[in-house]
């Protein structure tokens, strides 16, 4: 899935469809993996026929739900042709903050736990759906920012995927695995903002060029 298709998927949904997907997420938090189209229709106050019309089968509904949750993680707006050090910093910090807010939410924790369980037991497709439309799709959303930073002379790295994985690790640390294993860790908005800034500065220390270090951008160099 590409950046554009992932974000467009979320934006193209009507308010009613978004409410249905939110109902799916709430059912996952409450009931775990025992999700049926009947339960979703009942919770969302709509017919099963409407669900099948909008999303196809159960896997289609789950895919749309994961895409809806993942669409909340964005890299922000930037001008690729005129990217400067300040905008790059803000894009990275914003992405990290969005991602931390999403993965620490009860809905994402439930979604990922069910996906892991199904992947381990090979009972259902949610694991592969989460992987394709979550982690991989989110990666494709940030990689253009990293590539733009390299083109602007602000970043220096050989492989975009490796650079992304480094940033992903710096931003997430052990937060997600602790939550998935039942830790009651909670992060306030202030803590998320501080963690996002720390991850960004650590990443720029590793991959930033002299333009970043001096606080200048390509237009002022």
Image: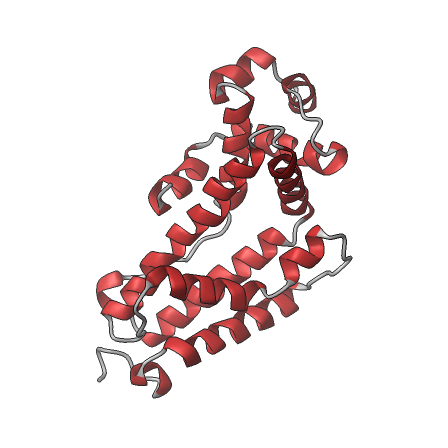
Query: x and y percent of residue 12 in the render?
Result: 41, 33
Is the residue 112 above or below the residue 47 in the image?
Answer: below
The location of residue 198, given as percent across then percent down, is 54, 75
Seen in the picture, residue 199 relative to 112 is either above or below; the reply is below
Q: Is residue 77 visible?
A: no
State the image quarter where residue 69 is shown.
top right
| Picture coordinates of residue 98, whole percent (x, y) | 53, 57
Which residue is pictured at 32% across the width and 57% down the height? 144
Q: Residue at x 45, y 53 (%)?
A: 74
- Total marks shown come to 0
- Colour scheme of this structure image? secondary structure
Q: Residue at x 46, y 32 (%)?
A: 13
Give whichever of 155, 115 is nearer the camera.
115
Asked if residue 55 shows in the view, the reply is yes
**Which residue ends up furthest to the top in the rendered image?**
49
* Residue 125 placement: quadrant: top right
Furthest-bottom residue in this view: 214
* Foreground of the two, 174 or 192: 174
Q: Is residue 208 above or below residue 181?
A: below
Residue at the location (69% across, 47% down)?
106
Residue 32 horizontal/vertical position (percent) = 72, 34
| Image quarter of the C terminus | bottom left
Observer-nearest of 209 and 47: 209
In the displayed structure image, the side of residue 66 where residue 90 appears, left or right:
left
In which quadrant will I find the N terminus?
top left
140 lies left or right of 219: right
């Amino acid at each position: 899935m590409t950046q554009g298709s992932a974000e467009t998927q979320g934006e193209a949904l009507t308010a009613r469809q978004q409410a249905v997907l939110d109902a799916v997420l709430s059912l996952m938090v409450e009931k775990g993996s025992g999700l049926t189209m009947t339960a979703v229709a009942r919770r969302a106050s709509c017919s099963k026929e409407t669900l099948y019309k909008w999303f196809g089968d159960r896997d289609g509904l789950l895919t749309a739900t994961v895409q809806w949750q993942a669409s909340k993680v964005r890299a922000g707006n930037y001008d690729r042709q005129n990217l400067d050090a300040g905008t790059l910093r803000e894009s990275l910090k914003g992405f990290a903050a969005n991602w931390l807010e999403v993965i620490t939410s009860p809905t994402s924790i439930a979604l990922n736990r069910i996906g892991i369980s199904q992947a381990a037991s090979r009972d259902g497709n949610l694991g592969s759906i989460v992987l394709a439309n979550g982690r991989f799709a989110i990666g494709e959303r940030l990689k253009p920012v990293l590539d733009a930073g390299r083109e602007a002379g602000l970043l220096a790295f050989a492989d975009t995927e490796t650079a992304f994985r480094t940033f992903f690790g710096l931003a997430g640390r052990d937060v997600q695995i602790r939550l998935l294993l039942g830790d009651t860790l909670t992060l306030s908005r202030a803590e998320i903002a501080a963690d996002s800034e720390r991850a960004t500065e650590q990443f720029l220390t590793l991959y930033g060029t002299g333009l970043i270090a001096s606080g200048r951008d390509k237009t002022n160099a």
